Amino acid sequence: MVELGKTGEQVSQVSLGCMLMGSTIDAATSYAMLDCFVEDGGTFLDTANCYAWWVGKGEFVGDESEMLLGAWMQARGNRDDLFLATKTGARLTNPAGIRNAQGEVEWERVSGEYQGLAPDTIRRSVEDSLRRLRTDRIDLYYAHIDDRDTALDDTLDALNRLVEQGKVRFIGCSNYRTWRIERARAISAAHGWAHYVAAQQEYSYLRPKPGADFGVGAHVDGEMLDYFRANDEIALVAYSPLLKGIYDDAEKRARYYNWSLYDSDDSRARLEVLGKMAGALGVSNSQLVLAWLLHHQPQVIPIFGMSSKAQYEHNMAALNITLDDAQMAELNAASA
Ligand SMILES: NC(=O)c1ccc[n+]([C@@H]2O[C@H](COP(=O)([O-])OP(=O)(O)OC[C@H]3O[C@@H](n4cnc5c(N)ncnc54)[C@H](OP(=O)(O)O)[C@@H]3O)[C@@H](O)[C@H]2O)c1
């Protein structure tokens, strides 16, 4: 277990990414993975109020992951044993209207369709999430993507009210640039409001090329790491730590929709060092990436995803890998 920021709240060292549960991952497989996670001591679950509207041909709207978790928690009667995180702001205003006649998502329109973080939206969406999750409170409620059209003060005020009402215990942000995290911290502090205690950002062992465009996403960079080193009251939570499973599969790497952002000599140098060390340790590259994150300074809580119980077990085994300072230094130093 690790402390979430300086909240005094203990959460599991890894968070389980529940994004595809209830859509591409069927209920039986999802329940099996969730049960194992709890048996393995896991508490920290990650979902959002929009998972996963984009898969399939229009049969999903974004309610599915929260609904599956709500049903599973009710069936197991284990809500109080869990640390449940969900998010607001990245739900689409009309998921049904974002597809062409063939049912394919028109991605170029998506950024204009997010619900955003206006106070009314937050007030409505928390009620919807609580209903789907069949609970009376959310442990960690993230602003999912930054909304530059809404004043940060208004978003933070609305989130603070949810904390005061007991609907939300802690608040966090996701896909915020460093200066926005800091501005939010300053606004919350000035008003004496609840402040973001976690930032959920994309982060893995491979480094994106300079200037790589992640759209609404905000990838961790050197400045952000420096910020987290100096501000340990906010926890760094890393999403997509396995880069969708490309570390052990060169063909999948080439097919990865974001590979162009990573296709560099720096990535090749890091893959070489990673692969050699993984081979020497008798683990997979993916497992070593997770172990690297678990030994990382500043502290990182990785949220990994998986599509099968076998992948789940493989990833959880990374918790048993110990890396010494020299191994961490070697992995950190790898570069073109
Ligand atoms: N805040 C945000 O904006 C944001 C964005 C994205 C995700 N998230 C959160 O982060 C969680 C994880 O994200 P992610 O799914 O993108 O993360 P990820 O851990 O980078 O990728 C998960 C995918 O990697 C593959 N994989 C996992 N374990 C593997 C293994 N042992 N061997 C081979 N392949 C493996 C699987 O793909 P295949 O099915 O192809 O095998 C799996 O679906 C999500 O569930 C969600 O909760 C948040």
Image (cartoon, helix red, strand yellow):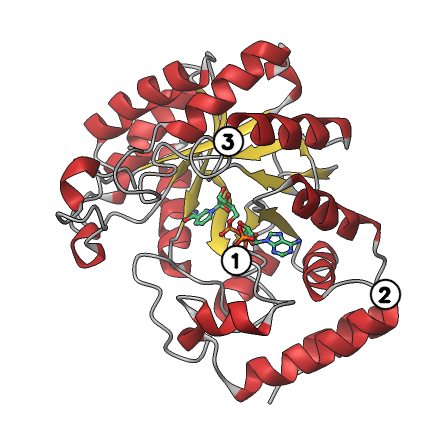
Q: Which amino acid does label 3 sit on?
A: Asp
Q: Where is residue 157 in the image (x, y as percent from the top left)?
A: 30, 31
State which tag comes first along the sequence, 3 or 2.
3
Q: Residue 192 — which label?
A: none
Q: Nearer the viewer, residue 155 or 129?
A: 129
State which tag comes first along the sequence, 3 or 1.
3
- Secondary structure of residue under mark 1: loop
In the picture provided, is 97 more to the left or to the right than 224? left
Q: Tell me if mark 1 has few (under 14), some (14-19) or many (20+) residues whose alpha carbon lies within 10 angstroms of its own.
A: some
Q: Distance between the residues labelled 1 and 2?
A: 22 Å
Q: What residue is disc 1 on? A: 244
- Residue at horizontal 37 percent and vertical 78 percent from the top: 211
Q: Can residue 8 be seen in this view?
A: no
Q: Distance between the residues labelled 3 and 2?
A: 32 Å
The correct choice, above or below, for 44 with respect to 261 in the image is above
Q: Where is residue 61 in the image (x, y as percent from the top left)?
A: 28, 32
Of discs 3 and 2, which sits in the foreground?
Answer: 3
- Residue at horizontal 72 percent and vertical 30 percent from the top: 36
Say whether mark 1 is within 8 Å of ligand 1. yes
Quadrant where the N terminus lies? top right
Q: Where is residue 83 in the image (x, y as percent from the top left)?
A: 59, 27
Q: What residue is disc 2 on? A: 282
In the picture provided, is 316 more to the left or to the right than 7? right
- Secondary structure of residue under mark 3: loop
Q: Tell me if mark 3 has few (under 14), some (14-19) or many (20+) residues whose alpha carbon lies within 10 angstroms of its own.
A: some
